[in-house]
Amino acid sequence: MAGRQTRNGGRVTAYFNEMYEDGRVRAPYARLEDWMRHMPAGLRSLKQAEAEDLFRRIGITFAVYGEGGDPDRLIPFDMFPRVFTAAEWARLERGIKQRARALNAFLVDIYQRGEIVRAGRIPARLVYQNEAYEKAVAGIRPPKGVYSHIVGIDLVRTGPDEFFVLEDNCRTPSGVSYMLENREIMMRMFPELFQANRIQPVDAYSDLLRRTLASVAPAKCDRDPCIVILTPGHFNSAYYEHSFLADLMGVELVEGQDLFVEGEFVWMRTTQGPKRVDVIYRRIDDAFLDPLCFRPDSVLGVPGLMDVYRSGGVALCSAPGAGVADDKAVYTFVPEMIRFYLGEEPILQNVPTWQCAREADLAYVMDRLPELVVKEVHGSGGYGMLVGPKASAEQIAAFRAKIAADPANYIAQPTLALSTVPTFVAEGVAPRHVDLRPYCLVGERVELVPGGLTRVALTEGSLVVNSSQGGGVKDTWVLAE
């Protein structure tokens, strides 16, 4: 179970095992070793089947578009939890909140005066020629100056004290339902673990989310705000999460056809007649929000919604145009945003990144493709990327041609030695690579629950944790002091 070593382009790479260090169990995992070693294989299989049955009965599934087979499949769940100490989490929490504040300050700025561009801290082309930049939002200051209300910060660990931000998700980061349900299922199956370990709860998330959404109600709202979740419908891969969060918060789950614009407000059709809506937590893309403003062929949105938004009659969470901050080329400038807007040094560091739009960076990347991870600047879900050390010569050659045809569409990063966490596999227990997505809520306050979604690459040696690429999930524990 010690940290594995593999060869990477002729070099030996050691991976930090979060449970074991120098042959000894690290303190956060001290009470899990006996549990792991004394669980018979039969009981482990029984518990795994129980977890899958619970996921199936609850309805926790996801879809992978464009593939045959079951469109609503279970996400693989691993019963071995990932554990952080209170001190480790305190540092992560400070860094996550700092980053969320800076990203929101950046979004307000680029849709207003563009001071960071005028100061030469970020190239204008990365902002104003970005496909996620929405001109329809220019000049609008959303309630409380918040563009991104739920910020998912993807983190990786490479050592005891080394954490890096892999990417930012400022539009509609998904997966929080897995964070909550992973905990619920672990508490059902292994109550003795929660009696033996002081684990901070995550079940306050829905209350914090509702409070965050209510806190950004528009100025025209003169009563307790009416909040709804706007979903594309049950064919969407994250529909379970939309309905799950609506139930937890006690708000209506609506589709575009359930809403309409009249006068200065958005209204919801109900059996008792129209009801005014103040805050829309939207889970549909910008392009489909309003056919009168964006894609005219959209049947998912609400005609006239953007007019009401501009006039301050409704809050949209997250605001249209927030996707500029998701861009993987813009990501490289987030440390500079922190310095520019907050006057602070970044608590969490970026992964070193080369922008292929730069001539020198492009030459470096092309020369070292077999060693690097290359990503599309607008890519997500593990698609549109090359993991050089795992790629064949044919795959590298094909990707080289793609980069040469459109360099600005790609960034590259070193192949990080992602940490591993013990994971139940067919042969017993083995280390597997993980990342972490905490969910930071931004409204009148900046808050997050102690934990997040740990994603695990279940294939031995794989660094790709996305569920669409075969990854699974784990419960994430933050120990109380």
Image (cartoon, rainbow, N blue to C red):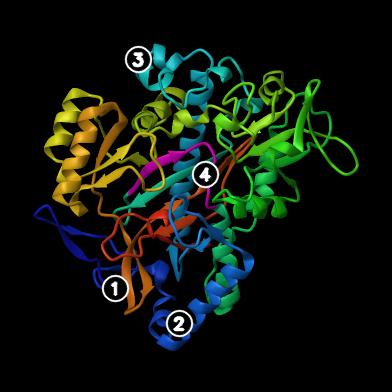
Q: Residue at x 44, y 81 (%)?
A: 35
Q: Which amino acid does label 4 sit on?
A: Pro
Q: Where is residue 259 in the image (x, y as percent from the top left)?
A: 75, 35
Q: Depth-wise, is mark 1 or mark 3 nearer the camera?
A: 3
Label 3 – label 2 distance at C-alpha: 58 Å
Which mark is first along the chain, 4 or 3?
A: 3
The number of callouts visible is 4
Asked if residue 29 lies left or right of residue 305, the reply is: left
Instruction: Say which residue label 3 marks.
Output: 120
First in residue order: circle 4 vs circle 2: 2
* Mark with earlier residue (1, 4): 1
- Asked if the residue under mark 3 is in contact with the one under mark 1, i.e. CB atoms within 8 Å, the reply is no
Q: What stretch is highlighted in magenta?
A: 163-175
Q: How far apart are marks 1 and 4 (CA)?
A: 36 Å
- Image coordinates of residue 80 in percent, x first then y, are 43, 71
Work out how far the residue at label 3 is from the one at label 4, CA to CA, in angstroms.
30 Å
According to the picture, the residue beneath numbered tag 2 turns out to be: 45
Query: Along the line of sight, which residue is nearer the eye, 471 or 1?
Result: 471
